[in-house]
């Protein structure tokens, strides 16, 4: 019934000459009502990780595979995601896939989806809701575990340090699951070690441009002209911005200089790790499309998908890498 209603809605929009009809195929025919319709709200395209995540979804949810994907780019605004979800509900899609910008603020709109009988799958980040039945499944990474991998590496790297270990922490989007987990791990590490000193906590918002700006401003200030041992960057694009700012201000990075820690482990970050500029890259796998499809297929077959599913990930140093390994990665 939902597929027939969506076909009628989209056909109607075509009749009125809509240029943005999400359901028209290349020949202009009305949509195939036998397709499973997925309404997807993506955070945006703020990072290399996010672009790879979107491409993974688009590669899986194709008409050839039996799906019609209605893809919405929220452009880093939660209100855009809420609007998109309500539009998907009106269109009576079969499933909603949501990559939440932040964890809070979802109870009302997810309740609306539940009342409409549309399962919601959370991808990458979590939603902090009072009723966990408001979403069918969550598929992503264990961000606290990622952060603890980084902290464990710091413990080994600075085990013999007698002087303070001076740390700059550059966070991702405040309130996002990745930011909360990676921040919590670093806070645990600092609290447990008397000689670990947090010099500054900056907001990089997961973007290279903003990180470069805030890091340059900090390093140019009187309080920023001191020794730095570690810059803890909550994703690769933050690391790229920090690396550029540090080197422009005369700070060597890598062995014998500032240790840059990053999360995501995209090709660009691993290349800098192999070159010795980045000391540690903790993997966060963006290729979640096949796992999301598994959850959809389970529900299509009347089964209950696994509530929380985490992908396997690892951490890389320069010694772990080769050019062939980097070239062979999908992101």
Image (cartoon, rainbow, N blue to C red):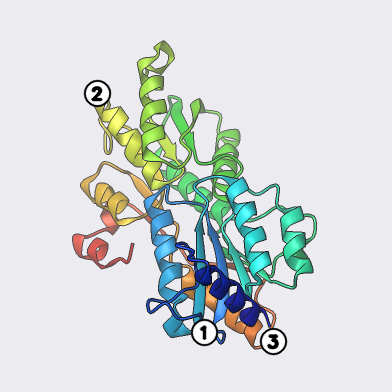
Residue drawn at x 45%, y 57% as measured from the top left: 284
Residue drawn at x 50%, y 41% as measured from the top left: 172
- Which x, y percent locates residue 72? 51, 59
From the viewer's side, name the closer residue of 45 and 138: 45
* Structural distance between the alpha carbons of marks 3 and 1: 22 Å
The kind of secondary structure element at disc 3 is loop
**198 above or below 126?**
above
The kind of secondary structure element at disc 2 is loop
* Structural distance between the alpha carbons of marks 2 and 1: 59 Å
Earlier in the chain: of badge 3 and badge 2, it is 2
Residue drawn at x 26%, y 61% as measured from the top left: 326
* Structural distance between the alpha carbons of marks 3 and 2: 60 Å
The kind of secondary structure element at disc 1 is loop
The image's mark for residue 18 is none
The residue identified by callout 1 is: 32
The residue identified by callout 3 is: 302
Q: Are marks 3 and 1 in contact (CB under 8 Å)?
A: no
Q: Report which quarter residue 218 is drawn in.
A: top left
Mark 1 packing: few (<14 Cα in 10 Å), some, or many (20+)? some
The residue identified by callout 2 is: 250
Earlier in the chain: of badge 2 and badge 1, it is 1
Position of the N terminus by quadrant: bottom right
């Amino acid at each position: 019934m939902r597929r027939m209603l969506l076909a009628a809605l989209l056909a109607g929009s075509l009749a009125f000459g809509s240029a943005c009809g999400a359901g028209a195929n290349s020949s202009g025919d009305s949509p195939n009502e036998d397709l499973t319709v997925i309404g997807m709200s993506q955070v945006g395209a703020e990072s290399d990780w996010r672009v790879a995540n979107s491409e993974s979804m688009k590669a899986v949810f194709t008409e050839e595979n039996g799906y019609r994907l209605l893809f919405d780019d929220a452009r880093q605004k939660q209100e855009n995601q809420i609007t998109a979800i309500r539009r998907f509900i009106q269109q009576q899609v079969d499933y909603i896939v949501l990559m939440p910008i932040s964890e809070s603020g979802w109870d009302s709109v997810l309740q609306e989806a539940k009342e409409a009988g549309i399962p919601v799958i959370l991808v990458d980040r979590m939603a902090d809701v009072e009723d966990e039945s408001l979403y069918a499944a969550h598929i992503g990474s264990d961000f606290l575990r990622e952060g603890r991998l980084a902290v464990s590496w710091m413990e080994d790297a600075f085990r013999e340090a007698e002087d303070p270990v001076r740390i700059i922490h550059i966070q991702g989007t405040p309130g996002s699951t990745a930011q909360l987990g990676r921040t919590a791990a670093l806070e645990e590490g600092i609290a447990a070690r008397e000689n670990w000193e947090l010099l500054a906590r900056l907001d990089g918002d997961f973007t290279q441009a903003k990180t470069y700006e805030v890091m340059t401003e900090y390093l140019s200030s009187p309080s920023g002209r001191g020794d730095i041992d570690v810059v803890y960057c909550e994703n690769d694009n933050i690391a790229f911005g920090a690396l550029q700012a540090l080197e422009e201000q005369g700070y060597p990075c890598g062995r014998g200089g500032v240790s840059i820690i990053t999360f995501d482990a995209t090709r660009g970050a691993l290349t800098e790790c192999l070159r010795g500029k980045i000391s540690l890259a903790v993997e966060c796998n963006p290729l979640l499309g096949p796992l999301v499809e598994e959850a959809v297929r389970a529900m299509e077959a009347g089964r209950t998908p696994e509530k929380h599913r985490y992908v396997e990930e690892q951490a890389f140093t320069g010694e772990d890498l080769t050019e062939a390994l980097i070239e062979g990665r999908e992101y």
